[in-house]
């Protein structure tokens, strides 16, 4: 029906359109041709129909591609919804599906820049499993239960009941952010380059951030050796080729603190070190000098909105 109405409107449009001065002076029976003509105006029934059908096709494309709200227009799927990072203009998915089928939603995002020139490198988004949102909302102090789920003796669990945005953004106290990461919930960091880069560049950035956090905190010699071994494993799991703009590298924290690395939907490997997993996330949530201050603020706002 829509196609028929468009064809009829196109036909009326053709009838009502004024002809050029040249055409008016050449409207003689001898100048009408059905087929090919040389040097004379020609009007063909077939070309008129083709024009009408073409206009109908363009109209149909405009209605459905632009998702105009007609009764029979198809709604967008949840996973096609995006959120824009304002500085770069990059849109990242508001909802993602991880390699194991876990559905996760965006908490917050920001841009990673380098040097005094503020060169934009990548957009970082932090996600939480949709199945674990209720766990976060029902935040309880239960040290013994959570300690049992972790196997490394050196891990210090820090629990606080409830979310406090001001404490999350503190420049002296990391207990709020550490407490969230201690919870048995699935979280993920999604990195999308805004320009072509390489796996070594991204890898070295994480290595420096983790090493810096090692130096800031107390750690026994044995624990330090375990972390250095885990860093070596992490470096081996990063993509070795060019990481193109618009592709996605994902670092996933499992409920038990295991880290899983994904690139473009492919599982690149696992690193079993809870301290490493926690401090990769803390690189973006640190009290002082996080990788992206704007990302931390946006994530803080996201938690605040999520937990209202």
Image (spheres, rainbow, N blue to C red):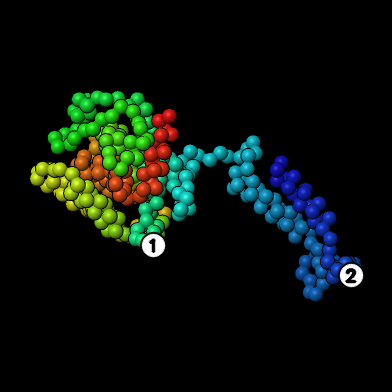
Residue position marked by numbered label 2 in the rendering: 25
Is residue 85 shown left or right of residue 31? left
Residue in view at x 79 percent, y 74 percent: 38
Residue in front for this viewpoint, 162 or 193: 162
| Residue 252 image point, x, y percent | 30, 42
Q: Looking at this view, name the residue that lies furthest to the bottom.
A: 39
Query: Is tag 2's residue or tag 1's residue first in the polypeptide sequence?
Result: 2
Mark 2 residue crowding within 10 angstroms, few (<14) / some (14–19) / many (20+): few
Instruction: Locate residue 257: give its quadrant.
Output: top left
Q: Is residue 47 above or below residue 225?
A: below
- The residue depicted at 35 percent of the width and 25 percent of the height is 138
Front one among 131 and 167: 167
The residue sitting at the left extreme is 221
Asked if marks 2 and 1 touch (Cβ < 8 Å), the reply is: no
Foreground tag (2 vs 1) = 1
Q: Residue at x 82, y 69 (%)?
A: 41
Q: Does the image show residue 97?
A: no
Q: Quadrant of the C terminus?
A: top left
Residue 117: mark in rendering: 1
**Residue nearest the viewer, comparing 170 with 55:** 170
Drawn side of residue 190 relative to residue 45, left or right:
left
Instruction: Give the image location of residue 259, x and y in percent.
Output: 25, 42
């Amino acid at each position: 029906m829509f196609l028929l109405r468009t064809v009829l409107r196109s036909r009326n449009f053709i009838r009502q359109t004024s002809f050029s001065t040249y055409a008016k002076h050449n409207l003689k029976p001898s100048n009408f041709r059905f087929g090919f003509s040389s040097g004379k105006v020609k009007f063909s029934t077939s070309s008129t129909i083709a024009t009408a059908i073409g206009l109908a096709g363009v109209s149909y494309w405009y209605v459905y591609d632009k998702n105009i709200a007609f009764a029979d227009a198809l709604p967008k799927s949840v996973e096609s919804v995006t959120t824009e990072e304002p500085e770069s203009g990059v849109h990242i998915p508001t909802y993602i599906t991880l390699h194991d089928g876990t559905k996760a939603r965006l908490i917050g995002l920001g841009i990673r820049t380098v040097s005094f020139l503020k060169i934009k490198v990548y957009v970082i988004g932090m996600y939480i499993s949709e199945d674990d949102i209720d766990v976060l909302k029902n935040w309880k102090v239960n040290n013994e239960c959570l300690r049992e789920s972790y196997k490394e003796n050196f891990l210090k669990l820090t629990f606080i009941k409830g979310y406090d945005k001001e404490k999350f953004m503190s420049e002296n106290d990391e207990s709020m952010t550490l407490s969230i990461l201690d919870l048995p919930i699935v979280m993920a960091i999604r990195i999308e380059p805004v320009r072509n880069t390489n796996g070594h560049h991204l890898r070295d950035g994480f290595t420096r951030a983790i090493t810096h956090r090692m130096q800031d905190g107390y750690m026994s010699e044995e624990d330090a050796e375990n972390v250095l071994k885990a860093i070596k494993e992490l470096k081996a799991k990063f993509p070795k080729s060019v990481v193109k703009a618009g592709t996605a590298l994902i670092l996933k924290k499992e409920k038990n603190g295991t880290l899983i690395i994904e690139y473009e939907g492919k599982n690149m490997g696992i690193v079993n070190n809870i301290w490493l997993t926690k401090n990769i996330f803390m690189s973006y949530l640190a009290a002082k000098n996080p990788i992206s201050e704007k990302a931390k603020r946006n994530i803080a706002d996201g938690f605040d909105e999520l937990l209202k």
